[in-house]
Image (cartoon, rainbow, N blue to C red):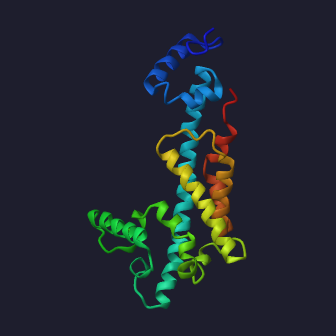
Amino acid sequence: MDKCTGEAGLGEGAEERDAVIVELLTEARLASYLRATRTRSGAMRLYEWNVRVAAGVMELTAAVEVVSRNAMDRELTSWANRRRAGDWLDAAPLDPRGRHDVDKAKERAARGGASGRHDRVLAELSFGFWRYLLSSRYHASLWVPDLHRAFPRGPVDLRSRRREVEGRMHRLHLARNRAAHHEPIHQRDLRRGLDDALDLLGWVHPMAAEWAADVTSLGAVLDARPSG
């Protein structure tokens, strides 16, 4: 039987539904799934799994983002307090890109009626902003003085710690963006992504990694990947 139009073993109703959904999703969108499975039903099952695994990536990345963001905010607040500089969002030596991100976050917070509220501005800053603070450009100005303490259980060498934290954050950011835009992530090393997330949480606090491993779904979804 033609693998593009039907497959033995599928019930007539399920086969018809798959045909309709393929048309609605478009074969172009399903191309990577068809290449991976070589059958329409296999592509559909892999696509459905991709939807579930994308949700798991978003769920786990949300935990990493909030825990890491709060830890970094705490240390940057300490950095500003020692300098009696006020809010670190205003005092930190951010480059034009970072300053633009903060200004936009303040605008969004103000539109929501929370002008000047530090916590609401933090909530408006993207995951990309926090990852960018871990780059080498801030190694001497922010990382060495205080920011490294946000991940106290990471590698002992501070330069290595920053690189390892930044690398994991970067990979998670890429996976999260693809998941958020409904792109195929079934070919990514998502086990590594899970390990990256748990590493980052564990470097903030071991119980954070333990909590995420217990309550987020990504591990279970990875175990349930369809074989066809």
Quadrant for the C terminus, please: top right
The residue sitting at the top extreme is 1
Could you tell me if residue 49 is visible in this image? Answer: yes
Residue 85 vs residue 34: left or right? left
Instruction: Using the image as rendered, state which of residue 124 and residue 30 is in the foreground.
Output: 30
Residue 106 vs residue 38: left or right? left
**Which x, y percent locates residue 193?**
64, 52
Residue at 49% x, 30% y is 29
The residue sitting at the right extreme is 156
Q: How many marks?
A: 0
Q: Is residue 7 above or below residue 99?
A: above
Could you tell me if residue 208 is visible in this image? Answer: no
Q: Is residue 203 above or below residue 175?
A: below
Instruction: Using the image as rendered, state which of residue 85 and residue 111 is in the foreground.
Output: 85
Name which quarter of the figure residue 53 lies in: top right
Residue at 63% x, 8% y is 1
**Which x, y percent locates residue 22?**
49, 22
Q: Is residue 49 above or below residue 152?
A: above
**Which x, y percent locates residue 36?**
64, 29
Residue 154 vs residue 5: left or right? right
**Which x, y percent locates residue 226?**
66, 31
Residue at 43% x, 91% y is 84
Name which quarter of the figure residue 143 lies in: bottom right
Residue at 53% x, 81% y is 141
Instruction: Using the image as rendered, state which of residue 62 and residue 127 is in the foreground.
Output: 127
